[in-house]
Image (tube, helix red, strand yellow):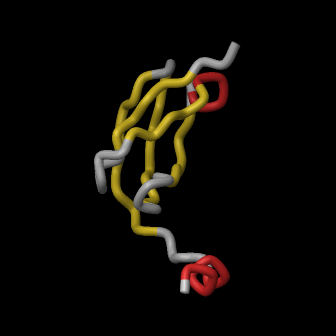
Amino acid sequence: MRHEFKLNCISCGHTVLLDENVYADYEGQIKCNACSAILSVKVEDGKLKSMNFVSHARPDPEESFLRR
């Protein structure tokens, strides 16, 4: 059974779901799928300890081309 926990993006407020099995003890970057914000997070024992905005991901040139 897959367990997830939720974080809210500090750039846009979108809910970001993280797999508890992978991110229960994690320090690094995650990407918001809604606004492409890169967030630096620290999670210990499945609890968010810190979250900081790093930047917005650069759009994929091919994806930008396909939107035209």
Residue for point 34% across, 51% down: 52
Q: Is residue 41 above or below residue 58?
A: above
Locate residue 18 relative to residue 53 in the image: left or right: right
Q: Is residue 44 above or below residue 42?
A: above
- Which of the image's four quarters has the C terminus? bottom right
**Residue closer to the observer: 44 or 57:** 57
**Residue closer to the observer: 62 or 23:** 62
Residue that lies at the very extreme toward the right in this rendered image? 1
Residue for point 48% across, 25% down: 5
Q: Is residue 3 above or below residue 27?
A: above
Residue for point 70% across, 13% down: 1
Quadrant of the rendered structure where residue 22 is?
top right
The percent position of residue 63, horizontal first and vertical second, equals 62, 77
Q: How many marks?
A: 0
The percent position of residue 55, horizontal first and vertical second, equals 40, 67
The percent position of residue 43, horizontal first and vertical second, equals 47, 31
